[in-house]
Amino acid sequence: MSIPIRNIAIIAHVDHGKTTLVDHLLKQSGTFRQTAEIEDRFMDSMDLERERGITIAAKNASFMYNDVKVNIVDTPGHSDFGGEVERILDMVDGAILLVDASEGPLPQTRFVLQKALEKNLKLLVCMNKIDRPDSRYDEVLNEIFDLFIDLDATDEQTDFETIYTIARDGIAVLDPKQKGEDFKILFDWIVEKFPSPKADPEGPLQMLVSNIDYDDFVGRLAIGRIRSGKIKIGDEVLVCYEEEQKKVKITALFQYKSSQKVKVNEIEAGDIAIVAGFEKITIGDSLTSVQDPKPLERIRVDEPTVAVHLSVNDSPFAGLEGTQVTSRKIKERLERELLNNVAIRVEPTETPETFKVIGRGELQLSVLFEQMRREGFEMLVSKPQVLFKDIDGVKSEPMETAVVDVEEAYLGAVTEKLGKRKGVLTNIDNKGSGRTRAEFKIPSRGLIGYRSEFLTDTRGTGLLNTRYEGYEAYKGKISSRITGGIMADRKGVATGYALNQLGDRGRLFVTPGVQVYMGMVVGEANKGIDLNVNVTKEKKLTNVRASGTDDAIKLAPVKPLTLEQSLEWINESELIEITPKSIRIRCREMDPNKRKSKHKEQ
């Protein structure tokens, strides 16, 4: 190879500092001009990523250091986006495992480390945020070692090296008591100790497509590491799809410089290539030599476990806010998502207006729906349901380990709530700082709708993380929401006078001036019964004027439900209406009399 190459990934639990670390690696490597102004979390290019402060899609970048080219991949940290991590590890030879010096290894740390160990990647442990006042790096180092042992790491893998960092300030040291200045130690480790790619530049072409992109000028782009041979513009290659093979001529080639795509004429084995020339290409396809075809094994990821039904919006306000409202447009958008997202499945249903969308979790699905509404789509979404399986004649369901980190005073309430949801306490660790970490084995369906309750029970101070643990025998019925809904019984505009009278009946979701329709859910009732109310009622005018009669109405503040909160809150008889401007909850059957009849029949 003409230039020495290192291909590495940054893997970690959510919010442990991956993107910030990549930012400073790019800045200190001299990738940008010294006078250039670079915004924080430079790699989080999607609006949703910047708003939520998390990485949703894996991204590539590169930099040069001491005449070595380093291709680096920033991966998501949330378990719902685990499919991104699994496929992206096929592109690298080593990984930096980032762990918070206070929180220590958390569920997603375990997940990403397990995938890296399975692929036998060279690992560097990077303990971040050592400047935190509650930093406990010695204990965390022992926890990381225990995690390696627990995951059956080899002796060579458990003999890992550790670098201590403050990614926010771009500082790396070998001893946490030292005072560092920059990332030089980390740079040197990357180029000296991470292995060069195992590649055969003289062999037949082999490239596995691990990521997909799109360019307005050249169309679909396939991204992956060249395992063998080389690729040039104008070459004819064989594309091995899942069910067929087809010859394709390469029309354009790109490489990453920083996070930008730069045109090149040729790319050799070991490097990461961006290839154009395809009408269709999907993740897992192989590019190989026409004369000596040797397709690579397709990428396999853990199966999704949660499903919702997505359908055309048929509410009274349908088509007023969105531009993409037909089933054909929705179907095309879901098919585009399948090209990029290997952890999503879409299945047809009995009606052409409804699609079954299956994913890893509520967050992953809500991100997809949020992206769609920003693109002008309108749709209806049902309550998330887990996928059951029949394993050896036994009805089985997906299980998860829930790790909670709470103040000791709140542990009892959390344990009680999770117990009602079929959660079993498996481990408890008192950290000695007034906080306790506990682990529960719980059905995935037991966690649907629990996160908002958890934040309420812990006064917003608790941390809840989960990891998928496979399928086990069905654990029995779990009680659903115990509160009822407050539904509008007619179409109109909500008034302050009517809403004020409902203040004692429950929690409101709407404010005065909001347009409502029959069957729209405008609040949550305190008791477990549904209420049909007139929220458009106005105060009757009289000739009598007395002191205080027309004082301004003071309503309790209303915090509109987010998409995630709505997915957690609704039950089987309700739907979420998602439009570019609004998120509303409505009943499946909007007529209150018909709802009452159906309830009696059940």
Image (cartoon, grey):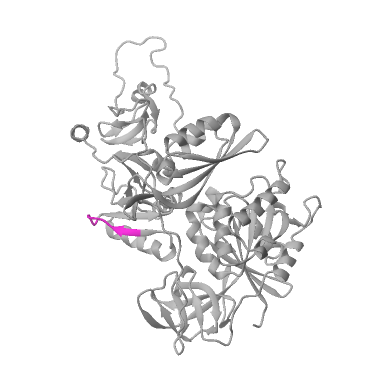
Along the horizontal axis of the image, is 245 left or right of 197?
left
Expressed as whole percent of the image width and height from the top left, the position of residue 19 reads 61, 56
Q: Nearer the viewer, residue 110 or 165?
A: 110
Q: Is residue 38 visible?
A: no
Give the number of callouts: 0
Above or below, 393 relative to 545: below
Q: Residue furthest right?
A: 178
Please say whether residue 351 is one of the residues in the magenta stretch: yes
For the point 29% across and 29% down, the residue is: 530
Expressed as whole percent of the image width and height from the top left, the position of residue 178 reads 81, 52
Please say whether residue 163 is one of the residues in the magenta stretch: no
Q: Nearer the viewer, residue 76 or 584?
A: 76
Q: Is residue 468 visible?
A: yes
Expressed as whole percent of the image width and height from the top left, the position of residue 418 reads 46, 36
Q: Which residues are magenta?
A: 346-352
Along the horizontal axis of the image, is 285 left or right of 516?
right
The image quadrant where one finds the C terminus is top left
